[in-house]
Amino acid sequence: MRSLLKARRKWREARMFAAAMASPATPILAQIIPIRRCNLACTYCNEYDKNSLPVPTFEMLSRIDKLCEFRTGIITFSGGEPTLHPDLDQLIRRARDGGAIVTVITNGYLLTPARIKRLNAAGLDYLQISIDNVQPDDVSKKSLKVLDRKLQWLAQYADFDVTINSVLGNDIRQPEDAFQIATRARELGFTSTVGVLHDGLGQLKALNPAATSVYERIKNLGTGLFSFAHHDGFQSNIVHALPNQWHCPAGGRFLYICEDGLVHYCSQQRGHPAIPLADYTVEDILREGAKPKACAPFCTISCVHQTAMLDRFRTEPRETLNGIISRRQQRDPNWHPPASIRLLENMFLKDSRTRDLFGALALRLFRVKQ
Ligand code: SF4
Ligand code: SF4
């Protein structure tokens, strides 16, 4: 059953990718806030409060409908703590029915076997939990010790894919914990990622040598082909406090919708452009997405980096794909591309006749309107 669901999810992801390639006016990822309140109070966090009410369900449904009208590929519910929204399951179902791949970012505290089964029934595709340390401390209570039972329930009951994100940053006292968290995630069959903590504007703080060495060890655990940390230079530059040269597509290919229903560039650049989603147009998507962002060189917001990488596939498919394949082969000279990459190679790297044929076939196969 799980493998069937996984295969269906991969198919929907391939459709999403094809749709994103077909039009620059299609948002690839939208992060939406159903509630700003959080049941925890991590000291580095500027994305929560202690008393706000859930966004009314009818408002949320209309925002989701608007994102689906744009044919947004992935809708991520974040917060605050999204599982505090009483109708989260209904919101997930609406986004799924609208054609999106649906993700929830949670601190995991409210997960129980029954809650996980409800998320299955709602059609959730991905759940991401960020774990900051092994033992809770006064910076963060998102600890392996507290959450391990929840992780075991997820391994047992979840039909959706689970990603465990560990973090490195100078505010995290025990960088070694990130390695233990990544190892435990992999033991349980989850994907593991590692993020670098940003300051209040989404900008880089250089990692100290102990944290950098843990990052390298986690990197060597290896993950899937498109794992950002491993196959793109962005994350590596971030860890070494070097600037990245990239175009941030926030406001266009990436949207952040706050609890008041305004579109912002990202969680750390709220206030720009701050246009109500209800009034947001395709022209806004194209204009805001194209604007240069002064914060880009030292930005650590990895989901926007990944969105930019997918966007780059549309404009520079050959360079992007070649880069991914050659970085993977540098790490492992015996590596051979899987079928999905061979298909992309045929679409983008072969001679122009093969490319046109595969491109047209893929769009027809995925029923993507150009
Ligand atoms: S659990 Fe997440 S939203 Fe809540 S305070 Fe911690 S980092 Fe912020
Ligand atoms: S570069 Fe983009 S994602 Fe990063 S902080 Fe600036 S607006 Fe946000």
Image (cartoon, grey):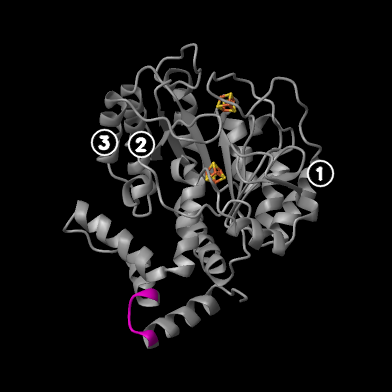
- As measured in the structure, the alpha-carbon distance from the residue carrying label 2 to the one carrying label 1 is 41 Å
Label 2: which residue? 241
Q: Residues within 10 Å of mark 2 (few under 14, many from 20)?
A: some
Q: Is residue 252 above or below residue 88?
A: below
- Residue 124 location in percent, x, y? 59, 46
Q: Residue at position x 26%, y 56% from top?
A: 327
- Residue 361 location in percent, x, y? 48, 81
In the image, the segment drawn in magenta is 348-352
Identify the element where label 3 is drawn.
helix
Question: Does the magenta segment cover residue 349?
Answer: yes
Residue 211 placement, left or right of 197: left
- Secondary structure mostly seen in magenta is loop
Find the residue positioned furthest to the left.
333
Find the residue positioned furthest to the bottom.
353
- Residue 333 location in percent, x, y? 16, 57
Front residue of 115/265: it is 265
Label 3: which residue? 216
Label 1: which residue? 59
Q: Amino acid at mark 2?
A: Ala
